[in-house]
Image (cartoon, grey):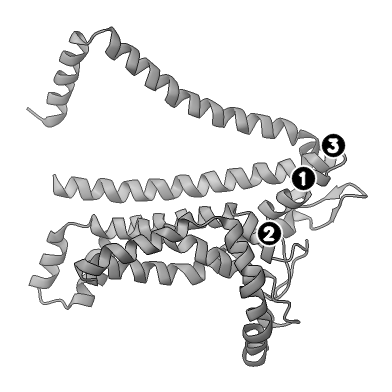
Amino acid sequence: MSREAALRISSKTLGAGQGVGDRGFRLLTRAAALGVTALMAALVVAMAWAALPSLEAFGWRFLVTSTWDPVAETFGALPFVYGTVVSSLLALLIAVPLSLGAAIYLAELAPPWIRQPIAFLIELLAAIPSVVYGLWGIFVLAPWLRTSVQPALGTWLGFLPLFQGPPYGVGMLAAGLILAIMIVPFITAVAREVLLAVPNAQREAALALGATRWETTRMAVLRYGRSGLIGAVLLGLGRALGETMAVTMVIGNRPEIALSLFAPGYTMASVIANEFTEATSDLYLAALIEIGLLLFAVTVAVNALARLLVWSAGGGVREVRE
C-alpha cells in the first residue's frame, strides 16, 4: 500500500472518530486562513476603488509619463517606477555576491564553532529599524560618498553616464547602498537554509568522482539548490522594492529620471510617505493610492514567485531524501 493511500485511510479513520472539539478547531483555523485571504482581497478592492479617479483620468498614461505637477493636477508615475527599479537592482548588484558568499561559507566551509555566531550576527542586521539605517546614511554614508567615493568614481569612470554630475552624497547610489545592507541578511539566511537542505549524498558523490571542494560546491551544491537561491534573491528584491523610510532619507526625493547614480531620485514608497499628508485634492490622493496599488501588486508578485521557487527547492530535497 502506498503512503498516500495509508494517509487517506488514516485521515478517514480519525475523521470518523473525531469529536466536536476537533471539528470546531478545524473550522476555526479554516476561518482564520480564509480571513487573511479575505483581508488581502478587501485591501486590493479598497485601494482600487480609492484610486479609481486617477485610473479614469490618466489610464495607462500614468505609467509612462514623467510629469508630476500637483498644482496642475497632472500626474505620471514613471520617475517613481524608474527610481524604484534602479535602486532595487543596484542593491541586488551589491548584495547578492556578498550574501551568496556568506551563505556558502556558513553552509560549506565555516568551522562549527564560528558558524552559528556569524549567522546570528548577520541575521541580527534584519532587526535594526530602517530609520536607524536612514540616520546612518544621512550622517555617515552620504558625507563619505560626497567627499570620497563619488569624486573618485567621477575621476576614474566619469566617461560613463552613470558616474557623471556633481557629487551630492544623497542620491540613487546612497539609496542602493542602504538597500543592499538591509537585504543582505534576508538573502543570506534563506540561501544558507537552501544550501543546508542539499543532501550530503550530492557532495559525497562529487567528492568520490575526484572533484575538489570548490568543484563540489559549484557543480553539486549550487546547481542542486539553484531554484531556491533564485528565490532567496527574489525575496531580497521584494524587500528592497517596498523599503520606505531609509530610502526616503537618502535618495534625495526629486521626481526626475537621470542616468547618473549621483543624481537624486524618487521611489514609489518614498513619494507616498512624503506627499500623502500633503494631498489636498481628490485626484492627487487617488494618484498616490494608485502608486501604492502598483507597488502592492509588484511586491506581491515578486514575493509569490520567490516563495514558489524556495518551496520547489525544498520539495525537491524532501523527495530525494524520501
Residue contact between numbered discs 3 and 1, judged by CB atoms under 8 Å: no
Spatial CA distance of label 3 from label 1 is: 11 Å
Query: Which residue: 66% across, 92% down?
Result: 155
Q: From the image, tell me which residue sits under label 3.
A: 282
Q: Earlier in the sequence, mark 2 or mark 3?
A: 2
Spatial CA distance of label 2 from label 1 is: 13 Å
Residue contact between numbered discs 2 and 3, judged by CB atoms under 8 Å: no
> Label for residue 276?
1
Spatial CA distance of label 2 from label 3 is: 24 Å
Q: Is residue 62 above or below residue 109?
A: above
Residue 86 can be seen in this image: no
Q: In which image quadrant can residue 161 be found?
A: bottom right
> Label for residue 248?
2
Amino acid type at image mark 2: Thr
Query: Which residue: 62% across, 33% down?
Result: 44
Q: Is residue 46 above or below residue 235?
A: above
Residue 94 as seen in the image, left or right of residue 17: right
